[in-house]
Image (cartoon, rainbow, N blue to C red):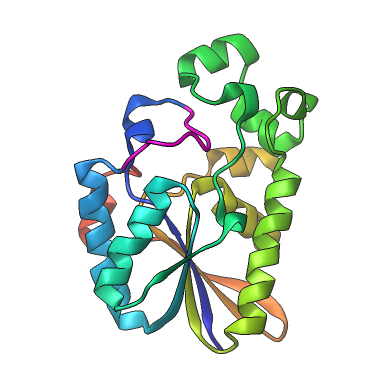
Amino acid sequence: MGLIIFLRHGQAQNNTSRVLAGRAPGVALTPKGVTQANDIGRFLKSLDISHIYASPIERAHKTAQIVGDHVGLPTTVDERLYELEMGRFSGMAYDDLFAKHGNVFLKFYQGDPTIEENGVETFAQVKNRVLSIVDHVRREHSGKNVLLVTHMDPIKAMISNVLNLNAQSLFELIIANASLTILREEQGKFSLSAINAMNPDRYNQGPF
């Protein structure tokens, strides 16, 4: 019985500037994000990880590489772990986005037409690709502990699949940078063993 462990990337430049980066290139980890990645890499050494998959996006891929250095594993890039395609919203500051379109994050979880109309990937589409890689891990790495390094909304998609959360709950749920969401499969069903697991000293530092 293995664990499927989701890891959100460490703090990145878009987190501190409050810009919706989406899949835009060149958004690197901050120095704090690199420290977070190293800390969670040391934390993960005790979990006997067998394989690491990561989003192609720099901030997630770099986090995976740092963790891999600690646990002695290479990284396999998988596009199913991609950040959201943000369409016309990519590169916009949060304040400008909210002023023009309202609470687009809540609308995203609600499946509001505004999302698709602006070329943004829907939450249903995110769920489908995340479930696809989870099924792949179940088939290819049965009984092993596997790490999936990705972004906030793919992790929320998996949590939503397990807990059937409503849109408001998903909007309010924050997945901290460089935190773990750990799932265990029992009798064909997933249960959540942890959300926002991280090094103890980080719990007083906030989500980013």
**Res 71 → quadrant:** bottom left
Horizontal relation, residue 32 to residue 140: left or right: left
Measuring from the top left, give residue 65's x and y in whole percent: 33, 62
Horizontal relation, residue 3 to residue 168: left or right: left
In the depicted structure, whether residue 185 falls above or below residue 67: below
Q: Main secondary structure of the magenta part?
A: loop
In the depicted structure, whether residue 35 falls above or below residue 109: below
**Res 84 → quadrant:** top right
Label count reads 0
Residue shown at 32% from the left, 43% from the top: 11
Instruction: For residue 109, say whether it is visible.
Output: yes
Image quarter where the N terminus lies is: bottom right
The magenta stretch spans residue 90: no
The magenta stretch spans residue 25: yes
Residue shown at 69% from the left, 56% from the top: 129
The magenta stretch is 20-28
In the depicted structure, whether residue 63 falls above or below residue 148: above
Measuring from the top left, give residue 162's x and y in whole percent: 67, 63
